Amino acid sequence: MTGPKAPDGGHPGAEAEAAGAGYGGFRIGGMHLALPLTSLREVVPCKDLVPLPSDVACVSGGQQIRATVVPVVDLRVVLDRPVTAIENPCVIVMIHDGHVLGLLAERIEEVFCMAPARPGRVAAGAGSLYDICVAWGDSHPISVLSPPALLALARVPAILDPEPWRSNRARNAEPTHLRPHLLMQTGHWHLAIDALEVHATLAASTVTAGALTHGACLGTIQVGQDTLAAFDLMALCGLGSLASGSRSPGFVVDCAGARVAFLVDTIVDFANVDPRSLVALAPYALPRPDLMRGLLPEGCVAGTQHWFTLDGAALRACEEVAGMAAATTGQADATPSGSGKLQTSPGRALLTFELDRKAAVPLEQIKEILGCTAQMEPLGEGPVMGLAVSAGRSIAVLDLSRLVGWAEKPAREGASILVVESGADLVGFMVQRLCDIETTRWEPSMPTHEDPHSRQPLASLGGAGQQHLVEVIDLQDLARRVQAHERWPARRGSNPRPTA
């Protein structure tokens, strides 16, 4: 895909250039709402609302933004909808007719364009908070709110715009060429991207490290029912690493039928940008110039700094991004092995266990499971941790953690030995703890760290809304390699990237 589509089904670019009508979507109380981008000043995390001297029930408090306290309205109260706790609330800062008001939101959704003269508009003076309700693709309808109606809510306080220069610049610009851009900061870098390339923005994201933790990919995040690969945008561009830790804001883009998140330190603003202001960058100026469209010099948008403008199409086409996107979504049809597409194996049973982290093995490979005794004595410098005996046959017990390049774990009481049959021999692999027998819905693969031509199989496990990816380890292949006297991996500490 090349970006969000207009509700009519066409690409937003053509309609945006013809009409310039852009909208930013968000969700609250089960409603999918939107504001015109001309009225959407910025989006900030909702933190520690301060009480305001207002007796209006829908005013939740004031959000401090720089030197200003902006009143925040909860539309659920206005529309008599249930008010429940929001896990990661954010505040939409709206500007209209020189006045600023905040709207509480659960999350930010699509940015889209549509023609201004669509049928179904609410008649002027009808007393509604919205101007029009439009279908969004094949999914939910979106109600476009009326900024004048929101400001006209009885006794709801609004403040005079403390930064009028931001609105004046947009009004004085040539409207036929303006494109809405998302502005963000990561480290000391100021970045921008065409907002029509963005599916949604994220107020805060909790990253889970795991099988996809590789290079600039930090792991996965959960957005609604979807598991998304999450990238450190700064690291992907070769500019450093994220400073804000495991709960970072960011934005989501569509990529080859999946969605991918890019995390930053701060979402700054939405702003109208004239693409003709872009200044070309020399190819040697940045580590990844292929990901940049150019530079917006200071004075073109908010603030007094330069803004490096990302190329949305190049981000989606980036091999690392496309590969991780493919690893987080299923495909309807199985494809040949080694293609980099997903391999579907519905109903395959896997035995899950813990080493340095959770992993899995096909259940059909396991001949038996033995308890591990702490009295085992290592045999030489290889990965053989000791010997076990079962049904009159000896079993060499191998250090599975060392074979796959993870942090080595000593033998201990309560650990288990997974026994596989390889030729005439029985080979055991020590694991820290058994988890469960689970059924996989599909199995992707991703390039290994050491050899981009070999692929590490993964499995999607868990029920709806709780899916997670684990690495699938082929114990029979490891056993054959041990029998062939291949060189043992060097001893190492914890390494999130498998080598087997």
Image (cartoon, grey):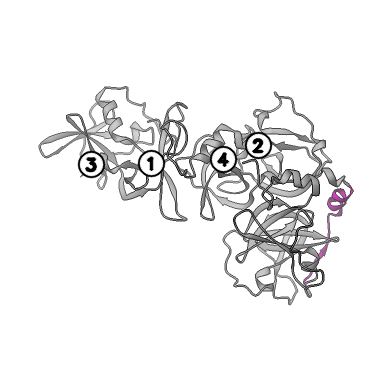
Instruction: For label 3, count other residues whose C-alpha is less than 10 Å away and answer few (under 14), some (14-19) or many (20+).
Output: few
Residues at marks 2 and 1, CA–CA distance in whole angstroms: 37 Å
Q: How far is mark 2 from mark 4, CA to CA?
A: 11 Å
Sequence-earlier tag: 2 or 4: 4
Residue visible at 79% across and 44% down?
A: 17
Which numbered mark, 3 or 2, is in the foreground of this view? 2
**Which residue corresponds to mark 1?**
356
Q: In which quarter of the image is residue 224?
A: bottom right
In the image, which is nearer the foreground, mark 2 or mark 1?
A: 2
Mark 1: few/some/many CA within 10 Å (<14, 14-19, 20+): some
Q: Name the kind of residue labelled 2 in the image.
A: Ala
Are circles 1 and 4 on residues that touch, CB within 8 Å?
no
Labels 3, 1: front one: 1
Could you tell me how far apart the alpha carbons at marks 3 and 1 are, in whole angstroms? 18 Å
Q: Residue at x 58, y 63 (%)?
A: 86
In percent of the image, x 13 and y 35: which residue is there? Answer: 393
Mark 4: which secondary structure? loop
Q: Say above or below: 222 vs 148.
A: above
Name the kind of residue labelled 3 in the image: Ala
Residue denoted by label 4: 256
- Residue reaching furthest to the bottom: 55
- Going by the image, does 156 lie left or right of 86? right
Residue 245 place in picture, x, y as percent: 57, 46
Mark 3 lies on residue: 374
**Amino acid type, mark 4:** Ala
Residue 257 in view: yes
Q: Give the range drawn in magenta.
A: 156-172
Residue 494: x %, y % from top left: 42, 36
Circles 2, 1 touching at the beta carbon (< 8 Å):
no
The earlier-in-sequence mark between 3 and 2 is: 2
Q: Nearer the viewer, residue 178 or 55?
A: 178
